[in-house]
Every structure is written in C-alpha cells, then in structure tokens.
Image (spheres, helix red, strand yellow):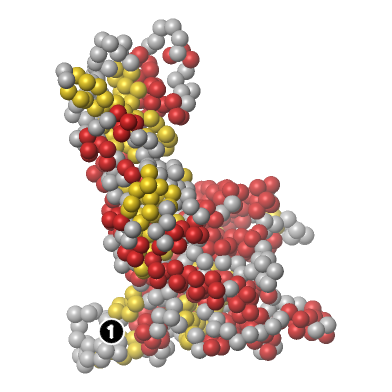
Amino acid sequence: MGTNRMEELKKHYMLGVLAVDEESYPRGLKNKSVTRMNSRKSNNPVIFYIKSISSSPKRFFELGIEDDLFVGFEQSFNPLGRDFLSSEFEYGSVDLNKKEKKIEEKLRGKLILFEPKIKHEMKNGEQRYHKNLDIIELLDYQSEDIFGELTELKKRGFKAVLSPQNDKKEFAQQLLNKKEVSFPNYNIKELIEFDLILNEDKLYFNLASGWQWVDENTCFHQEPEQIKVIPIPNEFYENVFYLHNQSLLFISTDYYKKLTNQAGIELTKDIKTEKFKETSITYSDEQRFLNSLKQKVLEEGLYYQQEDLYNLHISVKTNSLTIISGMSGTGKTKMAQLYADTLQANSKTEYLIIPISPSYTEPGDLLGYLNTMTGIYTPAETGLVDTLVEAHKNQDRLYLIIFDEMNLSQVEHWFSPFISILELEFEDRSINLYNSDNTCHNNNNYPSTIAIGENVKFIGTVNVDETTRDFSDRLLDRANVIKPSKRDFYQVKKDLAEGKFEQELGEINAKEYNIFNWVREPANSIEVMKEEELKLLDKLHAVINEIDAQKGVSFRILENIARYLENIPLDKEGELLISRADGFDLQLKQRVLTKLKGHQQQYGTLIGTLEPETEEEIHNSKIYEILSSELGQQVSAFSRSIAELKRKAREMNFNGYAT
C-alpha cells in the first residue's frame, strides 16, 4: 500500500469520545486516557486516546488496522486553535502534569468530530501503521436520555448521512440521468456503506451497489432505476445524533437500517410526481380555492375576516386537528361546513358533522361496540366508523370530520384513542374497534383495526362557558386553536354599500381542489425559523417552564409553527396572504398562550395585571416583557397575542383565574 494512497485519506470525518476505562493504551507511559509517550526519543510529549463510535474508512480495513483507538497529540488541536493551552505551556519549562489535566478537561464529556490520519514506519523490515487524528469540532454531550451514556455509545454505532453540493433542485434528475453528483466536503470513496443521502425534504436509498467513483468527492450511479425515495419522516431530526453542517450529520446504525429498509417509491416515479405537481398544481390554484371559499361565505350572509379564513385553511392543511373557538352564534360550525363544501366542489372530499352529546364518556359512544354474545359489531349512530372505513378505501380523497360543540363532554374521554395517534407517523396511525381475537361476523365491513391516514382531518367547534369542559395540555399540544373575530356590523354595511366584497373575489375557476398538493413539509424545522424567532421561543420557554415544569415551548410546537409559516398561501403577485410576522403572532396565540390557564398565585407573574381605569398596558407580565422587547418587536408586533394576554389579565383580575 503506497504512501500516496494513504495520503489521499482526507476529509473523511468520524465521531469519537475520550477513551476512558480501556484495558490498555498502546505506547503510553501510564495506562490512562491522557498521558505521555513511552519513548525517550519523543521527549515525553502529551498524547491522548480517542475511541471511535462511527464507521471507519475503507482504508483501515485494507491495511488491517481495525481497532477503534486513535492517538492524538497537541498538534491534533490545530484545526480548532490551541487557545485553551495557555502561553505558560508554550515557552520555557513545561508542567506536563498540568498540561495532561488541561487536555483531559477539554475532552472529557465531549463528542469529538475528527479527521483520521494514517502514519506509517518501517521497523525491523516490517511496515507499521499508526492511527492518528485532527480534531475538527468538540460538542458537549447532552443526549443521555435519547442515546444512552457517553461510555456506551460505541455499542450503538453511528453512520454518516450526506447531502450533495449539486443544484439541490436538479439532484434527482442528475441521479436518474447517471450524471456526476458531488460531495466536496466529504471523502465518499472511504465510506463502508454509502446508501443514504439527504436532499432537501427527501431521503434517497438503495444506492450501495451502483456507485461508480470519479474521485474521492464525485461519483455517479449506474443503476438509478433501483434507487428508492421517501419523504423525510417527522421524527428524523429527533434521531439525528450529531449535526456538523448542512452536508454532514450522523444517525444511529439502528435508525439507519430502519430508514434503508423501507419500501419507498422508485426514483423514476417520484420525479414524475414532482413534475406533475410543478406543472398542474400552482399556488394560484390554492388562491382560487380561497376565493371560492370567500364567495361561499358571502352567499351564506356571513362576514368573516379574511385573515380568519386563511388561518383556518393553513391550520387544516398542516394539522390533523383544528379547533374553532369563540362566543356562541358567530358561525363556527358553519365556517367549518363551508370549508368542507368548497373542497367538495369536484367531489374530492367528504365531510361528516357529529354533534357531541354531554353524555359521551368513552370512545365507544363515538365509534360503537362489538356484541360479544352475537358477534356483531354495531357502529355508533354518529356515522364516524363508516366514514373512516370509506376514507381508508379512498386514500386520494380528503375526509373532514367536524365535531360540533366538541367540549360539551370531556374531550379526553371520548376522543382519547385519536389523541394518542395524532402525533404518530401516518403509516402507524390506527384505531382499534375491538379485540382481533374476538369473533366478529361482520368484520368485512368493520375490521378490528382501521388505519387513519393523512386524508382524515378533524375540526372541532367549541364554546367557552359554564356548560363546557376545559382542554388538557395534551390535547392543546396537538391542535391549532383559532378564534375568529366578529366584524363590526356597521363596517360590514358600509363595505356592502361600497361593493368591496365583490371586488375581493376575483376570477373563479372550476378546479380539482386537492389540499394534499398545497402542503409543503419543511425539511428541518430549525432551518425554517429565523434566528430571532428561535431566541424568542427559547426565552418564552424559559419563563413558562420556570413557573410550571410541565409547560413550555416543546419541539412539537416548534415543528407546528414552522409548518404553519411554510404553508402560508401566496396571492397572484407572489406575496404572502398573511405576513410572516402576523403568522408567527397567530401561532404564538394558538399554540403557546392557550396553555396558560390557571390561578393567579401560579400564573400571575406570567400573565400580569391591567390598570382597571385604562386597561391600556399590561404590568408585571414576563410574557408581555418578552413580546414588547426589542427582540420581540423584531419578530412581530404581536397585536393578537398581546390582546389575548390582556383578556387573560382582565379575567385574572376579576376571578383570580385565567382560562
């Protein structure tokens, strides 16, 4: 194996940890993770040992050096800079014990991204190889609850997932046409397995056997018809163990296998689908749908704010459960019904309205029961089971289930099985009607289990008064709670006289309104959010979590906010129908402030107080301080969220309790 071949090992990155509790450390003066060379020629330089936890490069196996210990020296820190080794170590006499301690403190408890190096020497006519490294990045390890203790990570093993540097929009087409794809920030030729690529919102796999290498950073695939594609699963970034940059991340070997064992869709079919979406479904189709919705609303003599209709639309298309809240008589159920009617313009959807009874206490009241004596399943009169069975048979059609007066009974009782599945992947969502071991003579019509796909959406309408029940945080975490505002009667009359409503409508076309084609899934929720938005959410989480450890801004909330912002429709000029600032404000009100309910003793410092005379400004409110701060105002004016805070503060002042 020539020297040049070994020097080609560049830009291959591995993960490791400080090697503690090893039985032996080769070449060390003492048997510990940070020590000195056991050699007189070396003048006893400090060395340390790193244990790899990710796949080694091919070169190591070719050379027969397969152990997982790497030896590092002081100069191994050069890519990071050596500021932590203070000047007292650079000149004059050196306290080696102190230097050892300093290096150990720097490395202990860290994940270490490093570039492996091979050094060789001839000794007694025999070629010997040494595994060294350059440290690229250090990161505090804080994922014990997900991936286990630092010392146990080697047992799990981790693999690299790469992103190409080609035009990301053209990547799939380049693969299909056997054109070169480039990964300049990683030595792909050294990967033991190169079977998973991340590009925008999709994962490409079933790649391993077809690569033809051009050089260490460039290749093309000889069998593109074998390549499979899947959308990035919702849980993907929760399973990312280490993210170095946008072109390199690491996931566990187990999760790697789970992803690459999926069925997926063939690359050729996926490209055809993408082309269809680009050519036949445009944002103007979505705008025409919204215009049609506004027209239906006006025909019914209802005068909602346009923003409320847009908000409903974005909430429904990005979330499985949307709750419309507000005072009685404002047309909440009618709003949901008209939304369903508009989608049904070309028989592309079905909807069911279920009035909720105060007597509902369990899922059977909604679904039905199996009579174990007769072996007959009797569905509830709600009709829900029949609709779910039909939805499962017609995956390409959208089904809207509208729960009228949803909180007349305790939602968490009769809706409990649905709450449990709302956060699962669509392929894992299913409702059990009865035990499959029981005899059911009409199981052809009513199977023991019904899958709940992405084509089923739930909308609930609620009043908040003495006859209704409160929602739990568990439910609120999974729902968008929107509160339509009533337009002033006088302003409606004035607008009607001036013909403004007719001017708002625009041209209506007979289209196949298909909500699935209007949903855009962000590849990475963190990347979608602006820096100031993330800082704001972090501050809000800190003050809320300090008061109540069970509340805050969870990763699920972050994902839902990002999905909402990514799915705000455009008008014909390409402008957002709801500005990003207003969208963020709506989501904060609907996702975070809904959970701030309770006694003044606990939540008073979060919600604050209002001056009884003026009720202009909120005082002593940690939430208001954040929203009105310089950082908060960079994100949004937060007029809706601040108005909601005022409502809660007013309620707290009168009742000592906020809802």
User: Is residue 557 something that shows in the picture?
Assistant: no
Judged left or right of residue 215, residue 467 is right
Q: Nearer the viewer, residue 69 or 59?
A: 59
Q: Nearer the viewer, residue 167 or 231?
A: 167
Residue found at x 49% / y 59%: 170
Instruction: Give the x, y percent position of residue 197.
Output: 39, 54
Q: Which residue is mark 1?
A: 447
Q: Does 172 appear above or below 72? A: below
Q: Nearer the viewer, residue 38 or 585?
A: 38
What is the quadrant of residue 337 in the picture?
Answer: bottom right
Instruction: Give the x, y percent position of residue 462.
Output: 55, 77
Q: Does 565 appear above or below 101? A: below
Residue found at x 43% / y 52%: 181
Judged left or right of residue 305, residue 599 is left
Q: What is the total number of numbered labels drawn onto the structure image?
A: 1
Judged left or right of residue 471, residue 588 is right
Residue found at x 41% / y 7%: 93
Instruction: Give the x, y percent position of residue 562.
Output: 54, 60
Q: Amino acid at mark 1?
A: Pro
Judged left or right of residue 245, residue 363 is left
Residue found at x 38% / y 86%: 390
Q: Does 320 appear above or below 395? A: above
Instruction: Give the x, y percent position of residue 173.
Output: 45, 62
The quarter of the rendered structure image containing the N terminus is top left
What is the quadrant of residue 653 in the picture?
Answer: bottom right
Q: Nearer the viewer, residue 656 or 640?
A: 640
User: Is residue 81 something that shows in the picture?
Assistant: yes
Label 1 SS: loop
Extreme top residue here? 92
Neighbour class for label 1 at 10 Å: few (<14), some, many (≥20)?
A: some
The quarter of the rendered structure image containing the C terminus is bottom right
